[in-house]
Structures are given as C-alpha cells and as structure tokens.
Image (cartoon, rainbow, N blue to C red):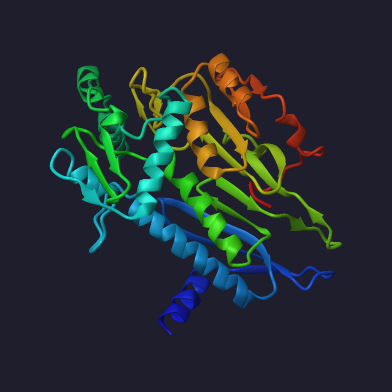
C-alpha cells in the first residue's frame, strides 16, 4: 500500500501529460520531478496506460533517488554510508559501503586513466574551495572573490586518485590522505542515468528517454503519427540565451546518450568576468578552451566523464582521444563561435534541423 501511495503522489507531482497515437495501442507520456541531483529530471516514453507509465516513472525515481543519496557529498542520511561518510572519515578509517559506490569509484578510476587525469574524482578539496567562493559570490555579487592561488596549490597536493583505497571483497573505501575529498560531479549523473536505464529496460520500459539535468539517455525508439519507429530527437542547447533559437542542432539518437559540459550553467562573476564550475586539474582554474563540448555515445556514464575531460583538453588532444574511442562522437564550440565536429557527428544531425525542444 505504501508503495502504491508513493507512486500516486509522485504521479501528481510530475504533472503527466498524454498525446494519443492513433495507430498504436501505446500512448506517449511525459513526467518530470525536481529533487534529484540538484536538477530537473524529465521522462518521455510510450506505454499502454497512464497507470503503467506511472509505475515506470516510480521505478526510475526510486533508482535515481538511491544513487543520489549514495553519491551525495553534502548530506548525511540515517543508516546510510555514502560519499560524504567516506569524506568525513578520510585518514581515519575505512567505510563499508554499498556496491554501487564501489562500482562508481572503479569506473571513475578507469576514466581517469583513459583521459590522462583530465577527469579526477579526487579533486574534491580543490573543487570545494571554488564552490565556496561561487556560492558566496552568488549571495553577495558585489563582494565576489576568487580563491587564493596559493591555497589552490596547497589543496592540489591532496588529489592523488591512487590514494583512494578500495577493498572490493570487504566492500570498503578508505581515503588514505586525511585532506583528500571526493567529488563525483563529473561522472555521477551520467553513471546513475545509465544504470537506471538498464533497470527500467528490464522492467519493460523499452521506448523512452531520460534526461537528468541535460544528461540524456534514450531507450529504443519513438513512434510518429503513423506508428512508425523513428529515432528520438535530442537537442544541443544554444549557449546564447539571447538568441531566439533554443537549440544549435537536433540529433537523431536511438539507444544512446548525449551529454554537454559548458560554461553557461553554473558560474559566478568577479570584476566583470565569468567563472564557471568546470575546473581544469592542470591549472586549478576554470577551463578556458571552449564554450561547450557535447559527447554522444551509448553509455551515459562515459559520455558524462568524457564531456568534462574533453572540455579540459586542448582541441587537438581531445579530438585525438575521441578518434581512438569506438562509438564516441563529439562537438566543440569555441569562444569565437567556431564549431568543430568529430568524423561521425554530423551524420546524426537531423536533415531539417528545425527548432525543437531539447528532448522530443
């Protein structure tokens, strides 16, 4: 009974809408909620009924909520050891954790190696200093300041990913360095979306799309008015908010993921200059190569990690990495408006490329 009541309340909160598909028994539904990963989650998909879609939405919510709690570095939860618990016990003792944390950390270490350290979950001590200054700057814009570079250098001494000790057999994690802090912001959303996509497909939701703060993962296909299967349409957001065009490109995407990292989402201003939240591990400052980088590949976790890593790399270096990876495509926009694409990216752009919502 409690489970059903939760689903009903969630359905009401999500304001589900329906569009009839005259040819198919299944109908198209949409849902959204606000309280996970500090962003908006949107679900679009086809189902036999509103009740069934509500059940699928509940499964998606429950999965994402579990990952959100486990990967949280800011909040404690009664009876749960999460990443904050690990950070709080840095240099003190190992922490027994859920396997989902172990798997995320192992995945993150692999991405660190793949990207030559351009995405590093052990950078938390540096990122937290930038976070503190950004929040203070947003609250008091006239008093906004940058972190002292000497303090950044000091904290950078505590970012060695090899000092994250993982005991898979005991399911324990220990930060050997007392001053180290984990921050999985560059990988957690995408990783959680990918795992949730697998779970919901097993439950029977095979034609849909999940978007968590712009981390988009498509499942199967959508149906047009004639009941024909077609790829999902996903848009790359126009970073120029003054433009009447919301999207730069609309892509055809079936069973894949689109993730974008850019300068325009989380930032603050100091002395008239914008400072965004994506910190280059090499300079300890916001990366300045691009306005945004978009990654398309099948795995949302990899797309999330790569979008940050490639954003932190000079174009030639990032393009060479993308070229080596099977099934991965990328788009870059430079500060002068120049756009560059990997070899297979343009083939995914819809021919009409007309203005659409980011997810449809």
Location of residue 360 in the rendering, given as x and y in whole percent from the top left corner: 69, 52
The correct choice, above or below, for 57 with respect to 233 in the image is: below
Using residue 167 as the reference point, say whether residue 212 is left or right of it: right
Location of residue 143 in the rendering, given as x and y in whole percent from the top left corner: 25, 30
In front here: 262 or 275?
A: 262
Q: How many discs appear?
A: 0
Kindly identify the residue that appears in the image at 55 percent across and 44 percent down. 300
The correct choice, above or below, for 66 with respect to 103 in the image is: below
Inspect this view and state whether residue 168 appears. yes
Residue sitting farthest toward the left: 92
Kindly identify the residue that appears in the image at 64 percent across and 45 percent down. 256
The correct choice, above or below, for 198 with respect to 253 in the image is: below
Location of residue 66 in the rendering, given as x and y in whole percent from the top left corner: 39, 59
In front here: 273 or 206?
A: 206
Kindly identify the residue that appears in the image at 45 percent across and 32 percent down. 111
Location of residue 101 in the rendering, given as x and y in whole percent from the top left corner: 35, 49
In front here: 40 or 217?
A: 217
**Which picture quadrant has residue 104?**
top left
On-image quarter of the N terminus? bottom left
Residue sitting farthest toward the bottom: 1
Using residue 11 as the reference point, say whether residue 91 is left or right of it: left
Using residue 161 as the reference point, say whether residue 323 is left or right of it: right
Residue sitting farthest toward the front: 169
The correct choice, above or below, for 195 with respect to 109 in the image is: below
């Amino acid at each position: 009974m409690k489970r059903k009541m939760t689903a009903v309340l969630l359905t009401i909160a999500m304001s589900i809408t329906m569009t009839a598909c005259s040819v198919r028994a299944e109908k198209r539904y949409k849902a959204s909620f606000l309280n996970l990963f500090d962003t908006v989650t949107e679900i679009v998909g086809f189902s036999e009924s509103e009740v069934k879609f509500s059940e699928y939405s509940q499964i998606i919510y429950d999965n994402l909520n579990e990952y959100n709690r486990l990967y949280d570095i800011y909040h404690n939860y009664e009876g749960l050891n999460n990443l904050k618990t690990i950070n709080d016990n840095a240099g003190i003792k190992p922490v027994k954790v859920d396997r989902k944390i172990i798997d995320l950390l192992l995945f993150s270490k692999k991405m660190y190696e793949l990207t030559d350290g351009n995405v590093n979950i052990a950078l938390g001590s540096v990122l937290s200093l930038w976070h503190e200054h950004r929040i203070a700057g947003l609250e008091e814009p006239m008093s906004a300041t940058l972190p002292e570079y000497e303090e950044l250098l000091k904290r950078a001494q505590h970012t060695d990913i090899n000092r994250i000790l993982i005991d898979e057999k005991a399911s324990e994690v220990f930060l050997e360095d007392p001053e180290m802090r984990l921050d999985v912001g560059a990988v957690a959303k995408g990783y959680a979306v990918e795992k949730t996509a697998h779970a919901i497909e097993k439950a029977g939701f095979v034609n849909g799309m999940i978007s968590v703060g712009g981390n988009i993962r498509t499942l199967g296909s959508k149906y047009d008015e004639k009941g024909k299967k077609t790829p999902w349409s996903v848009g790359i957001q126009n970073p120029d908010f003054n433009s009447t065009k919301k999207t730069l490109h609309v892509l055809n995407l079936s069973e894949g993921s689109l993730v974008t990292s850019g300068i325009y989402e989380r930032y603050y201003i100091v002395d008239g200059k914008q400072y965004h939240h994506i910190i280059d591990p090499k300079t300890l400052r916001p990366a300045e190569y691009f306005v945004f980088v978009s990654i398309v590949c099948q795995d949302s976790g990899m797309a999330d990690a790569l979008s940050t890593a490639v954003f932190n790399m000079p174009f030639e270096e990032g393009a060479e990495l993308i070229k080596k990876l099977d099934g991965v495509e990328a788009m870059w926009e430079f500060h002068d408006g120049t756009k560059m694409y990997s070899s297979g990216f343009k083939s995914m752009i819809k021919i009409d490329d007309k203005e659409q919502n980011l997810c449809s």
